[in-house]
Image (cartoon, helix red, strand yellow):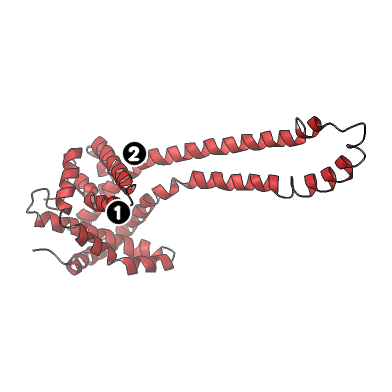
Amino acid sequence: MKRTRESLKMQAKASLHTNYWKLVLLGLIILLINGGSTGATAGSTASNAVSTATEGNYYGNSYYGDSYFGDSYYGDSYYGYSYYGDDYYDPYIEFGTGTGGSSFSVSSLLGTFVGVAAVIALAVVFVLDIFVLNPLAVGAHRFFLVNLRFPAQMREVLCAFDSNYKTTVTTMLLRDVKIVLWSLLFIFPGIVKAYEYRMVPYLLAECPEMSRKEVFAASADLMYGNKWRAFVLDLSFIGWNLLSTITLGLVGIFYVTPYQQLTNAAFYQAICQEKSGRIGDGDVYN
């Protein structure tokens, strides 16, 4: 018999009160992990900002303002008697190796430096996401799953680093790549695949001995006939997520995120039991 959303949420609330502060800490970690992909664009944003500032320097007051198109260059000094007279006029001096050319070279060098720094920053974030954040996410899922039975210990968060780390890294990376590639097909296929692979971190947390292919197959089996159910479960938290946004994330940190993560863990546990233990039973201490 399928469990209702109400029963899943009641189980989550009961579990939340038994280990509250650790669950809050894990919820914060989950938020930081989910923000990793957003942080990957920080280098690009910084590059654009510096580029804008540099253009401001050239097209603002310094070059196209008073200094170059004002009195100094288009005034008496350059277009007056001194430079348009018989002694000084030479276009190669003004537009070749003079001050303008030197400044442009410095700006180009600065732009190149910022671009290289942005690429390095993106690479660091990408590597950190693959080798640290994804395994931590698996450990966090294990923590929430364990906590459904009794107060979990923080060491659960590091489980992926102790058991089959290589499989965890490659499986989570492949999951992310598949979702991105499917999302290129007008987004909707990517959403479907995201729900199909939803149970991958739970399976890695509960059954670290499984191979990559087995994990993907098991997740697809568990979510077969349950994608819409999971989607409706997610929709039921829209009000809470809006409240979290209004409070600048405070409600999310101290209540919504741990509550929602525990509900998702209870959902995984429920569909495992509904599949008659053919994959797992949703109990990491069976």
Residue 5 occupies which quadrant of the picture? bottom left
Q: How many marks?
A: 2
Question: Would residue 4 appear left or right of 180 to someone viewing this image?
Answer: left
Q: Which residue is mark 2?
A: 131
Q: Position of residue 260 (x, y in %)?
A: 28, 61
Question: Would residue 252 appear left or right of 149 to someone viewing this image?
Answer: right
Residue at the image point whose x is 48% and y is 36% from the top: 120
Residue at the image point whose x is 18% and y is 55% from the top: 268
Q: Position of residue 202 (x, y in %)?
A: 21, 49
Q: Which residue is mark 1?
A: 188
Q: Observer-nearest residue: 173 or 71?
A: 71
Residue at the image point whose x is 80% and y is 31% from the top: 93
Residue 167 is labelled as none
Is residue 153 visible in the rendered structure shown here? no
Q: Observer-nearest residue: 47 or 187?
A: 187
Q: Observer-nearest residue: 79 or 120?
A: 79
Among numbered discs 2 and 1, the one appearing first in the sequence: 2
Question: Would residue 92 appear left or right of 51 to someone viewing this image?
Answer: right
Q: Secondary structure at mark 2?
A: helix
- Disc 2 or disc 1, which is closer to the eye? 1
Mark 1: few/some/many CA within 10 Å (<14, 14-19, 20+)? few
> Pointer 2 and pointer 1: residues touching (CB < 8 Å)?
no
Q: Position of residue 174 (x, y in %)?
A: 28, 40
Q: Secondary structure at mark 1?
A: helix
Residue 259 occupies which quadrant of the picture? bottom left
Question: Would residue 130 appear left or right of 84 to someone viewing this image?
Answer: left
Give the CA distance from mark 2 to mark 1: 28 Å
Mark 2: few/some/many CA within 10 Å (<14, 14-19, 20+)? some
Three-letter residue code for mark 2: Phe
Is residue 223 visible in the rendered structure shown here? yes
Three-letter residue code for mark 1: Phe
Q: Position of residue 1 (x, y in %)?
A: 8, 63
